[in-house]
Protein backbone atom coordinates (compact mmCIF):
# COMPACT_ATOMS: atom_id res chain seq x y z
CA UNK A 1 0.00 0.00 0.00
CA UNK A 2 2.86 2.33 0.87
CA UNK A 3 4.41 1.39 -2.48
CA UNK A 4 1.21 2.42 -4.33
CA UNK A 5 1.06 5.74 -2.46
CA UNK A 6 4.69 6.41 -3.33
CA UNK A 7 3.98 5.61 -6.97
CA UNK A 8 1.03 7.98 -7.12
CA UNK A 9 3.09 10.73 -5.52
CA UNK A 10 5.90 10.10 -8.01
CA UNK A 11 3.56 10.37 -10.98
CA UNK A 12 2.04 13.59 -9.59
CA UNK A 13 5.53 15.10 -9.40
CA UNK A 14 6.28 13.98 -12.96
CA UNK A 15 3.00 15.42 -14.29
CA UNK A 16 3.58 18.70 -12.45
CA UNK A 17 7.08 18.93 -13.93
CA UNK A 18 5.77 18.24 -17.44
CA UNK A 19 3.10 20.92 -17.05
CA UNK A 20 5.67 23.40 -15.74
CA UNK A 21 7.93 22.78 -18.71
CA UNK A 22 5.07 22.89 -21.22
CA UNK A 23 3.32 25.94 -19.74
CA UNK A 24 5.18 28.60 -21.81
CA UNK A 25 4.13 26.71 -24.95
CA UNK A 26 0.53 26.20 -23.79
CA UNK A 27 0.06 29.79 -22.55
CA UNK A 28 0.38 31.32 -26.02
CA UNK A 29 -1.93 28.74 -27.60
CA UNK A 30 -4.76 28.22 -25.08
CA UNK A 31 -7.17 31.21 -25.09
CA UNK A 32 -8.20 30.75 -21.42
CA UNK A 33 -4.59 30.69 -20.18
CA UNK A 34 -3.62 33.55 -22.46
CA UNK A 35 -6.51 35.72 -21.31
CA UNK A 36 -6.72 34.89 -17.60
CA UNK A 37 -3.19 33.99 -16.47
CA UNK A 38 0.19 35.61 -16.72
CA UNK A 39 2.88 34.33 -19.02
CA UNK A 40 5.72 32.51 -17.29
CA UNK A 41 8.86 31.17 -18.91
CA UNK A 42 10.46 28.47 -16.77
CA UNK A 43 13.59 28.34 -18.90
CA UNK A 44 14.23 32.06 -18.65
CA UNK A 45 13.68 31.98 -14.90
CA UNK A 46 16.49 29.43 -14.66
CA UNK A 47 18.76 31.70 -16.68
CA UNK A 48 17.82 34.79 -14.70
CA UNK A 49 20.82 35.68 -12.53
CA UNK A 50 19.82 39.23 -11.57
CA UNK A 51 20.68 39.66 -7.88
CA UNK A 52 18.20 40.99 -5.36
CA UNK A 53 19.14 44.39 -4.02
CA UNK A 54 17.50 47.49 -2.65
CA UNK A 55 19.22 49.91 -4.99
CA UNK A 56 17.66 48.55 -8.17
CA UNK A 57 21.00 48.11 -9.89
CA UNK A 58 19.52 45.80 -12.48
CA UNK A 59 20.95 45.76 -15.97
CA UNK A 60 19.24 48.40 -18.07
CA UNK A 61 17.39 47.42 -21.20
CA UNK A 62 19.57 47.22 -24.26
CA UNK A 63 18.37 46.91 -27.80
CA UNK A 64 19.61 43.87 -29.66
CA UNK A 65 20.25 46.20 -32.57
CA UNK A 66 20.62 49.97 -32.03
CA UNK A 67 17.35 51.69 -32.87
CA UNK A 68 17.67 53.45 -36.23
CA UNK A 69 17.21 57.12 -36.85
CA UNK A 70 13.91 57.36 -38.67
CA UNK A 71 13.61 59.79 -41.54
CA UNK A 72 10.16 61.33 -41.93
CA UNK A 73 9.42 60.55 -45.60
CA UNK A 74 7.21 63.61 -45.94
CA UNK A 75 9.89 66.07 -44.85
CA UNK A 76 13.21 64.16 -44.92
CA UNK A 77 13.70 65.25 -41.31
CA UNK A 78 15.42 62.99 -38.80
CA UNK A 79 16.04 63.16 -35.06
CA UNK A 80 17.75 60.73 -32.72
CA UNK A 81 16.21 57.90 -30.72
CA UNK A 82 18.54 58.56 -27.78
CA UNK A 83 19.07 61.34 -25.26
CA UNK A 84 22.45 62.95 -24.59
CA UNK A 85 23.18 60.32 -21.91
CA UNK A 86 22.49 57.53 -24.46
CA UNK A 87 19.21 56.68 -22.74
CA UNK A 88 16.57 55.53 -25.21
CA UNK A 89 13.55 57.81 -25.65
CA UNK A 90 12.52 56.93 -29.21
CA UNK A 91 11.50 60.46 -30.19
CA UNK A 92 12.52 59.63 -33.73
CA UNK A 93 9.53 57.29 -33.97
CA UNK A 94 7.13 60.14 -33.13
CA UNK A 95 8.11 62.38 -36.05
CA UNK A 96 4.77 61.93 -37.91
CA UNK A 97 3.02 63.35 -34.84
CA UNK A 98 5.49 66.23 -34.60
CA UNK A 99 4.94 67.02 -38.27
CA UNK A 100 1.18 67.29 -37.71
CA UNK A 101 1.79 69.68 -34.81
CA UNK A 102 4.20 71.72 -36.91
CA UNK A 103 1.70 72.07 -39.74
CA UNK A 104 -1.20 73.05 -37.45
CA UNK A 105 -3.64 71.89 -40.12
CA UNK A 106 -6.84 69.95 -39.57
CA UNK A 107 -7.55 67.84 -36.53
CA UNK A 108 -4.68 66.32 -34.52
CA UNK A 109 -5.96 63.41 -32.45
CA UNK A 110 -4.38 61.47 -29.59
CA UNK A 111 -5.63 58.24 -27.98
CA UNK A 112 -4.38 58.04 -24.38
CA UNK A 113 -4.85 54.53 -22.92
CA UNK A 114 -4.11 53.80 -19.28
CA UNK A 115 -5.09 52.36 -15.93
CA UNK A 116 -6.22 54.10 -12.74
CA UNK A 117 -3.26 56.49 -13.07
CA UNK A 118 -5.24 58.47 -15.65
CA UNK A 119 -8.72 57.71 -14.32
CA UNK A 120 -10.92 60.77 -14.15
CA UNK A 121 -8.86 62.29 -16.99
CA UNK A 122 -5.93 62.95 -14.62
CA UNK A 123 -2.65 63.74 -16.42
CA UNK A 124 -4.51 63.50 -19.72
CA UNK A 125 -6.52 66.68 -19.07
CA UNK A 126 -3.32 68.65 -18.41
CA UNK A 127 -1.83 67.45 -21.69
CA UNK A 128 -5.04 68.28 -23.56
CA UNK A 129 -5.38 71.73 -22.03
CA UNK A 130 -1.84 72.77 -22.87
CA UNK A 131 -1.88 71.41 -26.42
CA UNK A 132 -5.26 73.00 -27.18
CA UNK A 133 -4.07 76.37 -25.93
CA UNK A 134 -1.03 76.18 -28.19
CA UNK A 135 -2.39 74.41 -31.27
CA UNK A 136 -6.12 75.11 -31.05
CA UNK A 137 -9.06 72.80 -30.68
CA UNK A 138 -12.02 72.47 -28.33
CA UNK A 139 -13.81 69.54 -26.79
CA UNK A 140 -12.93 66.75 -24.40
CA UNK A 141 -12.95 64.09 -27.10
CA UNK A 142 -14.41 60.60 -26.79
CA UNK A 143 -16.78 59.94 -23.87
CA UNK A 144 -18.85 56.85 -23.05
CA UNK A 145 -22.62 56.54 -22.76
CA UNK A 146 -22.34 56.03 -18.99
CA UNK A 147 -19.62 55.78 -16.35
CA UNK A 148 -19.50 54.17 -12.89
CA UNK A 149 -17.96 57.32 -11.33
CA UNK A 150 -19.14 60.23 -13.53
CA UNK A 151 -18.58 62.92 -10.90
CA UNK A 152 -14.88 62.12 -10.49
CA UNK A 153 -13.98 63.49 -13.90
CA UNK A 154 -13.81 67.30 -13.95
CA UNK A 155 -13.29 67.83 -17.69
CA UNK A 156 -16.80 66.81 -18.77
CA UNK A 157 -20.28 66.79 -17.23
CA UNK A 158 -21.91 63.42 -17.82
CA UNK A 159 -25.38 62.34 -16.69
CA UNK A 160 -27.47 59.39 -17.83
CA UNK A 161 -30.39 57.11 -17.05
CA UNK A 162 -29.82 53.98 -14.98
CA UNK A 163 -30.98 51.80 -17.85
CA UNK A 164 -27.60 51.07 -19.44
CA UNK A 165 -25.34 48.04 -19.30
CA UNK A 166 -21.63 48.81 -19.60
CA UNK A 167 -19.08 46.15 -20.49
CA UNK A 168 -15.30 46.59 -20.68
CA UNK A 169 -12.33 44.58 -21.86
CA UNK A 170 -11.29 43.91 -18.25
CA UNK A 171 -14.61 42.37 -17.18
CA UNK A 172 -14.54 38.69 -16.25
CA UNK A 173 -17.65 38.29 -18.37
CA UNK A 174 -17.08 40.63 -21.33
CA UNK A 175 -20.34 39.66 -23.01
CA UNK A 176 -20.82 38.99 -26.70
CA UNK A 177 -20.76 42.48 -28.18
CA UNK A 178 -17.62 43.88 -29.83
CA UNK A 179 -15.74 46.63 -28.02
CA UNK A 180 -15.21 50.14 -29.31
CA UNK A 181 -12.01 52.16 -29.44
CA UNK A 182 -12.27 52.87 -25.69
CA UNK A 183 -12.44 49.19 -24.75
CA UNK A 184 -16.11 49.57 -23.78
CA UNK A 185 -19.56 48.91 -25.17
CA UNK A 186 -23.02 49.88 -23.94
CA UNK A 187 -26.47 48.48 -24.54
CA UNK A 188 -29.97 49.43 -23.51
CA UNK A 189 -31.53 47.35 -20.73
CA UNK A 190 -35.21 46.42 -20.68
CA UNK A 191 -37.16 44.66 -17.90
CA UNK A 192 -38.32 41.16 -18.67
CA UNK A 193 -42.13 40.85 -18.92
CA UNK A 194 -43.79 39.18 -15.96
CA UNK A 195 -44.93 35.61 -16.65
CA UNK A 196 -48.72 35.06 -16.85
CA UNK A 197 -50.55 33.97 -13.71
CA UNK A 198 -51.42 30.39 -14.55
CA UNK A 199 -53.28 29.87 -11.26
CA UNK A 200 -56.34 31.73 -12.58
CA UNK A 201 -59.21 29.95 -14.31
CA UNK A 202 -59.43 30.21 -18.12
CA UNK A 203 -62.50 32.45 -17.84
CA UNK A 204 -60.65 34.92 -15.66
CA UNK A 205 -57.61 34.83 -17.94
CA UNK A 206 -59.77 35.58 -21.00
CA UNK A 207 -61.38 38.64 -19.43
CA UNK A 208 -58.25 40.00 -17.70
CA UNK A 209 -56.99 43.29 -19.18
CA UNK A 210 -53.76 43.17 -21.14
CA UNK A 211 -50.76 44.21 -19.05
CA UNK A 212 -49.65 47.77 -19.58
CA UNK A 213 -46.39 48.06 -21.51
CA UNK A 214 -43.42 49.09 -19.41
CA UNK A 215 -41.98 52.38 -20.60
CA UNK A 216 -38.20 52.57 -20.21
CA UNK A 217 -36.31 55.77 -20.88
CA UNK A 218 -32.75 55.59 -22.12
CA UNK A 219 -30.85 58.85 -22.26
CA UNK A 220 -27.43 60.40 -21.81
CA UNK A 221 -26.32 64.01 -21.62
CA UNK A 222 -22.84 65.42 -22.12
CA UNK A 223 -21.84 68.93 -21.13
CA UNK A 224 -18.74 71.06 -21.33
CA UNK A 225 -16.68 71.89 -18.27
CA UNK A 226 -15.41 75.29 -17.20
CA UNK A 227 -12.43 73.67 -15.49
CA UNK A 228 -10.39 74.01 -18.67
CA UNK A 229 -10.38 76.53 -21.49
CA UNK A 230 -10.78 73.96 -24.25
CA UNK A 231 -13.51 71.86 -22.64
CA UNK A 232 -16.14 74.56 -22.17
CA UNK A 233 -17.76 74.00 -25.56
CA UNK A 234 -17.52 72.02 -28.79
CA UNK A 235 -18.79 72.57 -32.32
CA UNK A 236 -19.22 68.95 -33.38
CA UNK A 237 -20.62 65.91 -31.58
CA UNK A 238 -20.84 62.44 -33.10
CA UNK A 239 -22.44 59.24 -31.79
CA UNK A 240 -20.79 55.90 -32.60
CA UNK A 241 -22.64 52.60 -32.71
CA UNK A 242 -22.28 49.11 -34.15
CA UNK A 243 -24.63 46.69 -35.85
CA UNK A 244 -27.37 44.54 -34.33
CA UNK A 245 -26.06 41.14 -33.33
CA UNK A 246 -26.53 38.76 -36.26
CA UNK A 247 -27.85 35.92 -34.11
CA UNK A 248 -30.44 38.16 -32.48
CA UNK A 249 -34.17 37.63 -32.98
CA UNK A 250 -34.70 41.39 -32.68
CA UNK A 251 -33.84 43.29 -35.85
CA UNK A 252 -35.71 46.52 -35.19
CA UNK A 253 -33.75 49.61 -36.16
CA UNK A 254 -33.20 52.20 -33.51
CA UNK A 255 -33.61 55.94 -33.49
CA UNK A 256 -32.53 58.81 -31.29
CA UNK A 257 -33.62 62.35 -30.50
CA UNK A 258 -30.69 64.74 -30.22
CA UNK A 259 -31.19 68.06 -28.42
CA UNK A 260 -28.83 71.05 -28.20
CA UNK A 261 -29.08 74.86 -28.26
CA UNK A 262 -32.88 74.68 -28.00
CA UNK A 263 -33.10 72.51 -31.12
CA UNK A 264 -34.25 68.92 -31.27
CA UNK A 265 -34.33 66.44 -34.12
CA UNK A 266 -34.99 62.77 -34.58
CA UNK A 267 -32.25 60.72 -36.22
CA UNK A 268 -32.70 57.11 -37.40
CA UNK A 269 -29.87 54.70 -36.66
CA UNK A 270 -29.91 52.91 -40.00
CA UNK A 271 -26.22 52.04 -40.30
CA UNK A 272 -25.44 48.43 -41.15
CA UNK A 273 -21.64 48.55 -41.00
CA UNK A 274 -19.57 47.18 -38.16
CA UNK A 275 -19.03 50.82 -37.10
CA UNK A 276 -21.52 53.60 -37.80
CA UNK A 277 -21.73 57.23 -36.73
CA UNK A 278 -24.24 60.08 -36.81
CA UNK A 279 -23.81 63.78 -36.09
CA UNK A 280 -25.80 64.81 -33.01
CA UNK A 281 -24.61 68.44 -32.81
CA UNK A 282 -23.20 70.53 -35.64
CA UNK A 283 -22.72 74.02 -34.19
CA UNK A 284 -21.00 75.54 -31.16
CA UNK A 285 -22.67 74.35 -27.96
CA UNK A 286 -21.83 73.43 -24.39
CA UNK A 287 -24.36 70.63 -24.00
CA UNK A 288 -26.03 67.86 -25.98
CA UNK A 289 -28.63 65.35 -24.85
CA UNK A 290 -29.66 62.17 -26.63
CA UNK A 291 -32.83 60.17 -25.94
CA UNK A 292 -32.56 56.64 -27.28
CA UNK A 293 -35.12 54.22 -28.65
CA UNK A 294 -32.89 51.32 -29.53
CA UNK A 295 -33.08 47.54 -29.18
CA UNK A 296 -30.99 45.90 -26.50
CA UNK A 297 -29.11 44.06 -29.23
CA UNK A 298 -27.51 47.20 -30.67
CA UNK A 299 -24.03 48.00 -29.29
CA UNK A 300 -23.30 51.66 -28.58
CA UNK A 301 -19.75 52.94 -28.13
CA UNK A 302 -19.89 56.60 -27.11
CA UNK A 303 -19.77 60.14 -28.43
CA UNK A 304 -16.98 62.47 -29.49
CA UNK A 305 -17.15 66.12 -28.43
CA UNK A 306 -14.73 68.00 -30.67
CA UNK A 307 -13.91 70.60 -33.28
CA UNK A 308 -12.90 69.78 -36.86
CA UNK A 309 -9.49 71.41 -36.33
CA UNK A 310 -7.00 71.54 -33.48
CA UNK A 311 -5.95 68.99 -30.87
CA UNK A 312 -8.33 66.37 -29.47
CA UNK A 313 -7.09 64.03 -26.72
CA UNK A 314 -9.23 60.99 -25.87
CA UNK A 315 -8.92 59.52 -22.37
CA UNK A 316 -9.35 55.73 -22.35
CA UNK A 317 -8.79 54.71 -18.74
CA UNK A 318 -9.81 51.39 -17.20
CA UNK A 319 -8.94 50.69 -13.58
CA UNK A 320 -6.99 47.48 -13.03
CA UNK A 321 -5.86 47.15 -16.65
CA UNK A 322 -2.34 45.87 -17.32
CA UNK A 323 -2.61 46.66 -21.02
CA UNK A 324 -3.03 43.04 -22.03
CA UNK A 325 -6.84 43.32 -22.09
CA UNK A 326 -6.66 45.72 -25.05
CA UNK A 327 -6.17 42.62 -27.19
CA UNK A 328 -9.91 42.06 -26.75
CA UNK A 329 -10.60 45.01 -29.04
CA UNK A 330 -10.83 43.32 -32.41
CA UNK A 331 -8.39 44.51 -35.06
CA UNK A 332 -11.31 45.07 -37.41
CA UNK A 333 -12.88 47.50 -34.94
CA UNK A 334 -9.61 49.37 -34.35
CA UNK A 335 -9.21 49.78 -38.09
CA UNK A 336 -12.79 51.00 -38.48
CA UNK A 337 -12.36 53.64 -35.77
CA UNK A 338 -9.03 54.72 -37.24
CA UNK A 339 -10.68 55.30 -40.61
CA UNK A 340 -13.18 57.65 -38.96
CA UNK A 341 -11.20 59.32 -36.15
CA UNK A 342 -7.75 59.28 -37.81
CA UNK A 343 -5.47 59.16 -34.78
CA UNK A 344 -2.02 60.77 -34.98
CA UNK A 345 -0.59 59.34 -31.74
CA UNK A 346 -1.38 56.45 -29.40
CA UNK A 347 -0.17 56.52 -25.79
CA UNK A 348 -0.04 53.44 -23.54
CA UNK A 349 0.47 54.07 -19.81
CA UNK A 350 0.43 50.79 -17.89
CA UNK A 351 2.47 48.79 -15.41
CA UNK A 352 1.13 49.59 -11.94
CA UNK A 353 -1.15 46.56 -11.94
CA UNK A 354 1.62 44.02 -12.54
CA UNK A 355 4.07 45.23 -9.88
CA UNK A 356 5.36 42.51 -7.56
CA UNK A 357 8.32 43.30 -5.32
CA UNK A 358 9.36 39.63 -5.22
CA UNK A 359 9.38 39.22 -9.00
CA UNK A 360 12.84 39.61 -10.53
CA UNK A 361 12.15 38.88 -14.19
CA UNK A 362 9.67 40.96 -16.20
CA UNK A 363 10.60 39.64 -19.62
CA UNK A 364 7.14 38.06 -19.77
CA UNK A 365 5.62 41.55 -19.59
CA UNK A 366 7.91 42.75 -22.37
CA UNK A 367 6.53 39.97 -24.53
CA UNK A 368 2.94 40.80 -23.58
CA UNK A 369 3.44 44.45 -24.51
CA UNK A 370 5.03 43.31 -27.77
CA UNK A 371 1.74 41.61 -28.60
CA UNK A 372 -0.38 44.63 -27.64
CA UNK A 373 1.79 47.03 -29.63
CA UNK A 374 1.85 44.72 -32.65
CA UNK A 375 -1.95 44.39 -32.45
CA UNK A 376 -2.40 48.15 -32.74
CA UNK A 377 0.38 48.63 -35.29
CA UNK A 378 -1.24 46.08 -37.58
CA UNK A 379 -4.77 47.46 -37.15
CA UNK A 380 -3.75 51.14 -37.27
CA UNK A 381 -0.65 51.18 -39.50
CA UNK A 382 1.50 54.28 -39.51
CA UNK A 383 0.21 55.69 -36.22
CA UNK A 384 3.16 56.34 -33.86
CA UNK A 385 2.98 54.86 -30.37
CA UNK A 386 4.40 56.25 -27.13
CA UNK A 387 4.95 53.90 -24.18
CA UNK A 388 4.72 55.69 -20.82
CA UNK A 389 6.25 53.94 -17.83
CA UNK A 390 4.50 54.07 -14.44
CA UNK A 391 5.17 56.48 -11.62
CA UNK A 392 7.11 55.47 -8.55
CA UNK A 393 5.26 53.40 -5.96
CA UNK A 394 6.29 52.91 -2.34
CA UNK A 395 5.89 49.89 -0.09
CA UNK A 396 6.74 49.47 3.58
CA UNK A 397 10.18 48.11 4.38
CA UNK A 398 10.22 47.63 8.13
CA UNK A 399 8.82 50.87 9.48
CA UNK A 400 9.91 52.99 6.50
CA UNK A 401 8.36 53.49 3.06
CA UNK A 402 10.69 52.77 0.13
CA UNK A 403 10.27 52.36 -3.61
CA UNK A 404 8.89 49.04 -4.75
CA UNK A 405 11.93 47.54 -6.54
CA UNK A 406 9.70 46.20 -9.30
CA UNK A 407 8.93 49.75 -10.51
CA UNK A 408 12.44 49.97 -11.89
CA UNK A 409 12.20 46.50 -13.41
CA UNK A 410 8.87 47.15 -15.12
CA UNK A 411 10.20 50.47 -16.42
CA UNK A 412 13.11 48.70 -18.09
CA UNK A 413 10.78 46.01 -19.45
CA UNK A 414 8.61 48.68 -21.03
CA UNK A 415 11.63 50.53 -22.39
CA UNK A 416 12.71 47.28 -24.02
CA UNK A 417 9.26 46.86 -25.57
CA UNK A 418 9.45 50.37 -26.99
CA UNK A 419 12.92 49.75 -28.42
CA UNK A 420 11.95 46.42 -29.95
CA UNK A 421 8.74 47.74 -31.51
CA UNK A 422 9.97 51.19 -32.67
CA UNK A 423 7.94 53.25 -30.21
CA UNK A 424 8.70 56.35 -28.18
CA UNK A 425 9.32 55.93 -24.47
CA UNK A 426 8.83 58.17 -21.43
CA UNK A 427 9.22 57.23 -17.76
CA UNK A 428 7.25 58.91 -14.98
CA UNK A 429 9.43 57.06 -12.46
CA UNK A 430 12.52 58.79 -13.84
CA UNK A 431 10.80 62.14 -14.33
CA UNK A 432 9.70 62.15 -10.68
CA UNK A 433 13.28 61.63 -9.53
CA UNK A 434 13.63 57.86 -9.45
CA UNK A 435 13.99 55.81 -6.30
CA UNK A 436 11.95 56.98 -3.29
CA UNK A 437 10.52 59.94 -5.21
CA UNK A 438 6.96 58.90 -4.29
CA UNK A 439 7.87 59.19 -0.59
CA UNK A 440 8.98 62.75 -1.24
CA UNK A 441 5.81 63.57 -3.19
CA UNK A 442 3.64 62.30 -0.33
CA UNK A 443 5.60 63.38 2.74
CA UNK A 444 7.75 66.36 1.78
CA UNK A 445 6.18 68.26 -1.09
CA UNK A 446 3.71 71.00 -0.20
CA UNK A 447 1.04 70.88 -1.28
CA UNK A 448 1.11 67.09 -1.35
CA UNK A 449 1.37 65.65 -4.84
CA UNK A 450 0.23 62.08 -4.19
CA UNK A 451 -2.24 60.12 -2.11
CA UNK A 452 -1.47 58.21 1.08
CA UNK A 453 -1.55 54.93 -0.85
CA UNK A 454 1.91 55.97 -2.11
CA UNK A 455 0.78 54.91 -5.58
CA UNK A 456 -1.55 57.44 -7.19
CA UNK A 457 -1.14 61.15 -7.86
CA UNK A 458 -3.69 63.56 -6.46
CA UNK A 459 -4.98 66.37 -8.68
CA UNK A 460 -1.94 68.56 -7.94
CA UNK A 461 0.49 65.74 -8.62
CA UNK A 462 -1.32 64.73 -11.81
CA UNK A 463 -0.92 68.27 -13.09
CA UNK A 464 2.81 68.21 -12.35
CA UNK A 465 3.12 64.80 -14.01
CA UNK A 466 1.17 65.99 -17.03
CA UNK A 467 3.59 68.87 -17.41
CA UNK A 468 6.51 66.43 -17.28
CA UNK A 469 4.99 64.53 -20.20
CA UNK A 470 4.33 67.79 -22.03
CA UNK A 471 7.96 68.84 -21.58
CA UNK A 472 9.00 65.54 -23.15
CA UNK A 473 6.64 65.87 -26.12
CA UNK A 474 7.23 69.56 -26.77
CA UNK A 475 10.97 69.04 -26.36
CA UNK A 476 10.75 66.44 -29.10
CA UNK A 477 8.72 68.84 -31.23
CA UNK A 478 11.33 71.56 -30.73
CA UNK A 479 14.10 69.16 -31.75
CA UNK A 480 12.09 68.18 -34.81
CA UNK A 481 11.43 71.79 -35.81
CA UNK A 482 15.14 72.63 -35.52
CA UNK A 483 15.96 69.65 -37.72
CA UNK A 484 13.22 70.71 -40.14
CA UNK A 485 14.82 74.12 -40.56
CA UNK A 486 18.14 72.43 -41.39
CA UNK A 487 16.65 69.86 -43.75
CA UNK A 488 18.10 69.59 -47.27
CA UNK A 489 16.08 71.56 -49.81
Image (tube, rainbow, N blue to C red):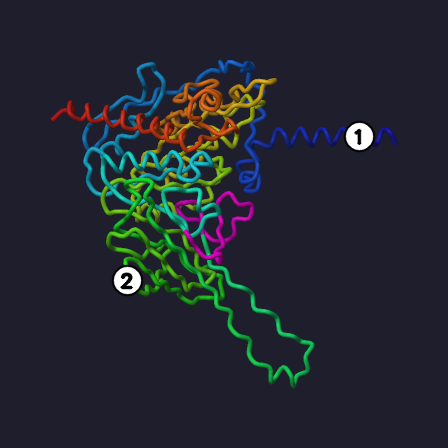
Residue topped by disc 2: 263
Badge 2 marks a residue whose secondary structure is: strand
Please tell me whether residue 113 is drawn above or below residue 20 in the rendered image.
below
Mark count = 2
Horizontal side of residue 172 vs 411, given as left or right: right
Residue at 20% over, 33% down:
102
Local crowd size for mark 2, using a 10 Å CA cut-off: few (<14), some (14–19), many (≥20): few
Q: Which of the marked residues, 2 or 1, is nearer the chain's N terminus?
A: 1
Residue 470: x %, y % from top left: 31, 29
Badge 1 marks a residue whose secondary structure is: helix
Residue topped by disc 1: 7
Horizontal side of residue 345 vs 363, given as left or right: left
8 or 256: which is nearer to us? 256
Extreme front residue here?
A: 446
Q: Is residue 164 magenta?
A: yes
Horizontal side of residue 364 vs 75, given as left or right: right
Please tell me whether residue 263 is drawn above or below residue 350 in the rendered image.
below
Most common SS among magenta residues: loop
Residue 415: x %, y % from top left: 41, 24
Please tell me whether residue 236 is drawn above or below residue 80 in the rendered image.
below
Q: Quadrant of the C terminus?
A: top left
Mark 2 to mark 1 CA distance (whole Å): 80 Å
Part of the protein shown in magenta: 159-185
Q: Is residue 237 magenta?
A: no
The numbered disc on residue 90 is: none
Q: Nearer the viewer, mark 2 or mark 1?
A: 2
473 or 465: which is nearer to us? 465
Residue 429: x %, y % from top left: 43, 23
Amino acid sequence: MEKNAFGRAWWMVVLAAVFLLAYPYLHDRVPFLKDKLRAYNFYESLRNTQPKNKKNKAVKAKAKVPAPVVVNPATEVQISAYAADNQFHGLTFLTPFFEKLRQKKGQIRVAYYGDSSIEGDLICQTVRDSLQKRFGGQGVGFVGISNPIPGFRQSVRLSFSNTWQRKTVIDKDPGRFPFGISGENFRALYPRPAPPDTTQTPAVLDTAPAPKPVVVNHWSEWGGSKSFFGTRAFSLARLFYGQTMKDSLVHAKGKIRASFNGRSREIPLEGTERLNSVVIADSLTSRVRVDFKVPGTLPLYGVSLETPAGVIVDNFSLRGNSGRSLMRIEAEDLTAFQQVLDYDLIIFQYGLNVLNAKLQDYSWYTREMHQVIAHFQKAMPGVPILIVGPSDKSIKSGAIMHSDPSVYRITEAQRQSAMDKSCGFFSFYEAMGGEDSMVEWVEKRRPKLANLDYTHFNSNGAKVAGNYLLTFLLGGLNEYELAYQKRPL
